[in-house]
Amino acid sequence: MSFLGLSSGKTKVPKKSGNVSSLQKQYLLKEYAEQTLGSGNLRLAVHLPEGEDLNEWLAVNTVDFFNQINMLYGTITEFCTPQDCPVMNAGPKYEYHWKDDTQFKKPARVSAPVYVDHLMSWVQSQLDNETIFPSKIGVDFPPDFKTVINDIFRRLFRVYAHIYSIHFSVIVSLGEEAHLNTSFKHFILFVKEFNLIDPKELAPLSDLIESLVAQLKN
Ligand code: ZN
């Protein structure tokens, strides 16, 4: 993993001089992302900061979106049960079947909570994999890093899609609507900035995405 302290050129990211560890640097990048987010300018918040490493930026934001989605889904788990949601979907037109390299080699039609559980555990295992997300200084990201990132974002999108399509009224009754919308808007702008998800995959929420992006133009 390359690291900020050694990058050449100008950078707007605050950093300590000297031997900044990779984890400290990730912390500084995260802090920078939070500051720009706090300014309310989401377009600026997704932008790769000047002089920064793209993979580093993708990694920090992936962890952040994973945590946000974990928290958002956590607020509705008592309403997303195998009885209420016997299959993972984004409305009647879109059904998702779980597949992975270990337990489910063939796509399996599982309930939404089981699907989300597999999905989040899978993302966590990618994040914990030192060969994909190295935490040590001097260890590079793998050549297929962008492919892994694309897979993670494609899957994380499905959790937003399920929450919006099936549980939005609960989100509203919990007063979590603004939180969800801000998180999703940030997610979509980030996805568009770095071309992380095939537009076809975004179809279940295409109307919402259009209106969120249009709001930002005003
Ligand atoms: Zn559900």
Image: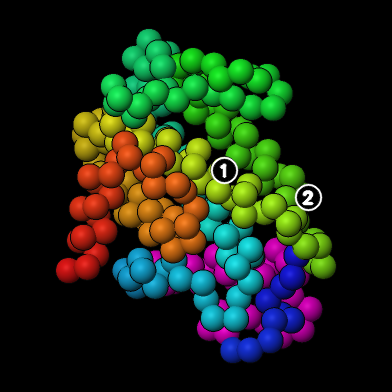
User: In the shown orientation, is residue 93 left or right of residue 134?
Assistant: left
Between residues 164 and 98, which one lies in front from this camera angle?
A: 98
Residue holding disc 2: 131
Amino acid on which the number 1 mark rests in the picture: Asp
Q: Residues within 10 Å of mark 1 (few under 14, many from 20)?
A: few
Q: Secondary structure at mark 2?
A: loop
Label 2 near label 1: C-beta < 8 Å?
no
Amino acid on which the number 2 mark rests in the picture: Thr
Residue with the most extreme right position = 138
Name the residue located 49 percent from the left edge and 28 percent from the top edge.
Answer: 116
Residue 165 vertical position relative to residue 60 in the rendered view, above or below: above
Disc 1 under 8 Å from ligand 1? The reply is: no
Between residues 139 and 194, which one lies in front from this camera angle?
A: 194
For marks 1 and 2, give the one nearer the viewer: 1
Q: Which residues are magenta?
A: 11-38
Residue with the most extreme bottom position = 10
Q: Position of residue 1 (x, y in %)?
A: 75, 65
Q: Position of residue 115 (x, y in %)?
A: 50, 24
Name the residue located 63 percent from the left edge and 71 percent from the top edge.
Answer: 53
Q: Does the segment drawn in magenta span residue 21? A: yes
Residue with the most extreme left position = 218
Name the residue located 35 percent from the left edge and 66 percent from the top edge.
Answer: 42
Residue holding disc 1: 151
Q: Secondary structure at mark 1?
A: helix
